Amino acid sequence: MRRVLLKLSGEALAGEKHTGFDEATCLQVAGQVKQVCEDGIQVGVVIGGGNFWRGRTSENIDRAKSDQIGMLATVMNCIYVSEMFRSVGLKTKVFTPFPMGPMAEMFTKDAALDCLERGVVTFFAGGTGHPYFSTDTTTTLRAVEIEADVILLAKAVDGVYDSDPKLNPDAKKYDEIPIQRVIDGKLGVMDLTASIMCMENKMPMMVFGLGEENSIVNTLNGKFSGTKVTV
């Protein structure tokens, strides 16, 4: 495996606080990504914004404006986590699809590929730059654009289940499942737009729990305990 796109859940990065950042969790992720990079794997990163803003939280806020707040939440997350990565010796770059002054660079495929090929961990912040698209869609879009081998979907849940394990203690976990079955069953791995994009572009996913010890490293070293979503 040469290049991966790592999607991190904003909520998972918040740890038990469920909001903001849990520095210990972020540093633990940074240590794992450093090990992955030392093994020669190129890493792109997308981070959700749910530790600051999740969806349209008030009917008094226009949906487009609400989504813009969410985009800015992902920018904050990427800047913070990129600094955690730098603190362990990694080189990083944050890209956004809209101007952010000195805080980030405008995304282009060529610039992102140049960073990845030089071993720079490359963050894709700000979503797609447009409302009505989630960070799930951003993840799939950037994974396809940078020609990643696989999406690593690090979530608060340790895989794909036939129903919500938080609500159903008898929910069944899948070791492997086709993306078409995920779409047909509306299993909520990613939103529908992102799932269909994965199917159309034959982009596989590996879904696992971020909270498990060495989960990112283990996923890439054949000790995978989550769910593989095939295409």
Image (cartoon, helix red, strand yellow):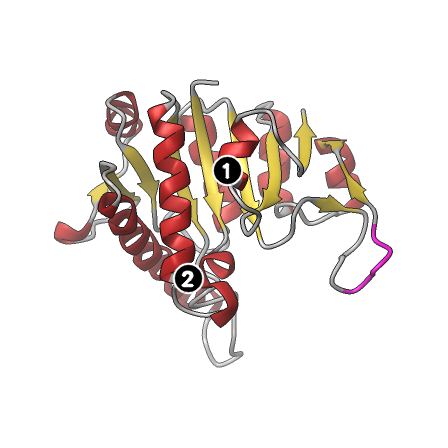
**Disc on the earlier residue, 1 or 2:** 2
The residue that mark 1 highlights is: 216
Give the x, y percent position of residue 168: 82, 61
Give the x, y percent position of residue 155: 57, 50
Three-letter amino acid code of the residue under disc 1: Ile
Q: Nearer the viewer, mark 1 or mark 2?
A: 1
Residue 168 on the magenta segment: yes
- Residue 177 vertical position relative to residue 51 in the rendered view, above or below: above
Give the crowd class for mark 1: few <14, some 14-19, many >=20 residues within 10 Å: many
Residue name at image x 23 percent, y 41 percent: 106
Q: Which residues are magenta?
A: 167-171
Q: Taking the image as drawn, is residue 118 in sight?
A: yes
Badge 1 element = helix
The residue that mark 2 highlights is: 70
Q: Is residue 159 left or right of residue 221?
A: right
Q: Looking at the image, which is closer to me, 199 or 148?
A: 148
